[in-house]
């Protein structure tokens, strides 16, 4: 247990049940100055608010209690600090330069299925400025993290219970503040682990297969899936070393219109897959695990099940052609749980891509209020989603402890890690930089989960170098491929085979060891990872100087330039030069200090 620092600030206030009077308490903190806790209409709710400091990190605890169960009131916690060496804002779903928006445009929302309540203001020197984390990982947390023009100040606010909540008689939320001048990524990783522990979220078991490269049908086939085509692609994928296939949307319908009107019955299209069970067996005999896509909440208007669940939907989305199930009904949760277990048993599946968890939401009036919650055994949607997904996980793991369960951004938060063991970067087809950014963000926000790239694709006329750069941009995550393997050149296949082998030979260092991504504001131009045996460093931006680490080091040139700039301490060291296919093409001596080394684009140095 961590040692409690000598300096401990405690400020506790009780708000008596005085109807019509607001509650406000200012807590003095070292990290964020004065933090104001405000509730305009507490009603009969009592408030307690206090702070403590431990090992340079401060914690705020806010506790609410009521003599009777009732809807909790809206309340907020806010702060304001001078903008000093803080010019960017990290979030788990952030991209490009991580912009700090003006406070009048900095609204965002997190919940169980959307992001995570974790923010970091940072500068340009890889140091933490101020990291804010909250352990409310299930319900909505409305945030405003931005820059106030008057005085150029960083302002932040967290607001709770902004949507109607089922009655309760107590509630506690904790906020973590970290202003230590530590390496920025370490502060985020520590905050992520604290959120997991404080919220009581035990991560799902991650089998070794979750770290193996895979093939996805989505970007090349979309819904136009056919058994013979899939088998041909899987035969090629297996020969290149891919270990799993994900069959995405299209297997359950004869329709190619990209909608969800036919979701909900989840029967295999016999026109597309005339012998599905034997097909799955054939692919698995190739040495590949078989996963299938499901849009969890959707029941399409053209499905047989649409009328079955009438009155048990959260809302209807005309654009999608589907309604969203209300998981507060026990029969809804039972239907979905049994659906996946039966599919695993009947078809011999190894895993599931469970999509659109973020669609479990309430927009406008909650239909349960008009029904007085009739038929619902759980009153709040986040609690019901949690019960549903825990039930699905437990049922699938009871059948197969190594079952694979994938989720993707935006739903990659602390709670979601309890239900799945593969987190994928959100769709960014052809965008190598965003793929790299997403991988780094997820590795920091969900430590211990197998982080996957978005599916890699490239044009068939692209050069082997650019194919290699696409792969290298995803190298610090588990690589998912979605190129049409039958149509690419032999050189492209050679590139895939080499880098796929490289990713597996160095899997422990790349995916399971220490991890140091640099300068998120510049798109992570240098990324380091490793263990006690080796270090792997990739340089993605021309002209950057990378520091050589002690021990065996791989320096990857992921730029379009044929030059790497290295800073090496101590004595001169020998290095072997490899090209983008992994072939040895020369040797070089790296001297102490900063050196310019000729390395072909897409190639790498091995420094002994």
Image (cartoon, helix red, strand yellow):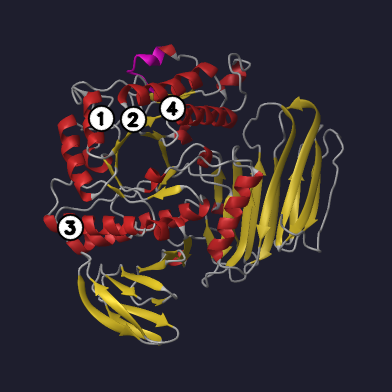
Q: Which mark is residue 399?
A: 4
Q: Please tell me whether mark 4 sits on a helix, a strand or a loop.
A: helix
Q: Which residue is mark 3?
A: 494
Give the class, few, some or many, for how many residues have Cα within 10 Å of label 1's Cα (few <14, many ≥20).
some
Q: How far apart are the two marked residues, 3 and 1, measured between alpha carbons?
A: 27 Å
Q: Is residue 414 above or below residue 83?
A: above
**Relative to 206, 248 lies left or right:** left
For residue 280, which numbered disc appears in the image?
Answer: 1
Q: Residue at x 67, y 54 (%)?
A: 176
Q: Is residue 351 above or below residue 264?
A: below
> Mark 2 to mark 1: distance in Å?
8 Å
| Residue occupying the point 30% across, 20% down | 267
- Which one is nearer the viewer's eye here, 90 or 80? 90
Closer to viewer: mark 4 or mark 3: 4
Where the N terminus falls, by quadrant?
A: bottom right
Callout 4 touching callout 3 (CB < 8 Å):
no
Measured from the top left, where is residue 56 in percent x and y?
Answer: 71, 64
Is residue 578 at least partly visible in the picture?
A: yes
CA–CA distance in space, label 4 to label 3: 38 Å
Circle 2 residue:
349
Numbered disc 1: secondary structure: helix
Distance Cα–Cα, label 4 vs label 1: 18 Å
3 or 1: tag closer to the N-terminus: 1
* Kind of element beneath mark 3: helix
Toward the viewer: 557 or 41? 557
The residue sitting at 23% across, 73% down in the picture is 600
The outermost residue toward the top is 308
Residue 42 shows in the view:
no
Point out the tag, 4 or 1, that comes first from the N-terminus. Answer: 1
Quadrant location of the C terminus in the rendered image: bottom left
The verdict on residue 196 being magenta is: no
Which range is magenta? 299-307
């Amino acid at each position: 247990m961590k040692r409690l620092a000598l300096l401990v600030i405690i400020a506790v206030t009780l708000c008596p049940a005085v109807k019509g009077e607001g509650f406000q308490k200012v807590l003095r903190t070292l990290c964020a100055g004065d933090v104001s806790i405000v509730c305009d209409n507490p009603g009969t709710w009592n408030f307690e608010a206090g702070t403590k400091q431990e090992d340079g990190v401060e914690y705020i605890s806010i506790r609410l209690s009521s003599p009777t169960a009732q809807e909790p009131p809206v309340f907020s916690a806010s702060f304001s600090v001078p903008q000093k060496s803080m010019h960017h804002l990290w979030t788990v779903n952030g991209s490009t330069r991580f912009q700090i928006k003006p406070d009048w445009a900095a609204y965002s929302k997190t919940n169980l299925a959307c992001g995570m309540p974790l923010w970091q203001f940072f500068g340009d020197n890889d140091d933490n400025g101020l990291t804010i984390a909250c352990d409310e990982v299930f319900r909505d947390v409305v945030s405003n993290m931005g820059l106030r023009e008057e005085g150029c100040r960083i302002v932040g606010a967290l607001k709770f219970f902004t949507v109607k909540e089922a009655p309760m008689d107590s509630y506690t939320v904790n906020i973590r503040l970290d202003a230590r001048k530590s390496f920025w990524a370490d502060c985020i990783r520590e905050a992520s682990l604290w959120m997991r522990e404080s919220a009581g979220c035990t991560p799902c078991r991650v089998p070794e297969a979750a770290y193996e490269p895979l093939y996805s049908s989505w970007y090349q086939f979309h819904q136009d899936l056919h058994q013979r085509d899939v088998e041909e692609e899987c035969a090629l994928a297996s020969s290149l070393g891919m270990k799993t296939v994900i069959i995405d949307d299209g297997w359950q319908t004869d329709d190619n219109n990209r909608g969800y009107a036919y979701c909900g019955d989840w029967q295999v299209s016999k026109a597309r897959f005339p012998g599905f069970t034997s097909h799955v067996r054939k692919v698995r005999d190739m040495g590949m695990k078989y996963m299938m896509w499901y849009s969890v909440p959707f029941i399409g208007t053209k499905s047989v099940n649409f009328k079955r669940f009438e009155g048990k939907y959260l809302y209807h989305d005309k654009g999608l052609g589907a309604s969203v199930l209300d998981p507060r009904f026990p029969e809804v949760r039972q239907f979905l749980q049994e659906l996946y277990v039966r599919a695993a048993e009947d078809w011999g599946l190894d895993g599931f891509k469970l999509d659109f968890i973020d669609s479990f939401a309430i927009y406008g009036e909650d239909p349960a209020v008009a029904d007085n919650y009739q038929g619902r055994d759980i009153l709040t949607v986040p609690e019901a989603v949690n019960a549903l997904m825990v039930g699905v996980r437990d049922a699938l793991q009871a059948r197969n402890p190594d079952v694979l369960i994938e989720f993707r951004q935006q739903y990659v938060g602390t709670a979601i890690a309890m239900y799945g063991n593969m987190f994928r970067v959100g769709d960014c087809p052809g965008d190598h930089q965003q793929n790299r950014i997403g991988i780094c963000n997820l590795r920091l926000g969900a430590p211990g989960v197998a982080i996957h790239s978005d599916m890699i694709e490239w044009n068939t006329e692209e050069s082997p170098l650019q194919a290699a750069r696409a792969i290298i941009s995803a190298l610090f995550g588990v690589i998912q491929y979605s190129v049409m393997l039958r149509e690419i050149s032999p050189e492209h296949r050679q590139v895939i085979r080499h880098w796929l082998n490289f990713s597996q030979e160095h899997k422990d260092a790349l995916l399971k060891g220490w991890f140091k991504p640099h300068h998120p504001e510049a798109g992570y131009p240098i990324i380091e990872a490793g263990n006690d045996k080796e270090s792997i460093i990739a340089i993605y931006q021309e002209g950057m100087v990378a520091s050589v680490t002690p021990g065996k080091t791989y320096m990857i040139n992921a730029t379009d330039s044929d030059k790497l700039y290295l800073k090496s301490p101590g004595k001169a060291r020998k290095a072997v030069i490899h090209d983008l296919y992994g072939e040895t093409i020369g040797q070089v001596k790296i001297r102490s200090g900063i050196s310019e080394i000729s390395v072909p684009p897409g190639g790498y140095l091995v420094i002994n």
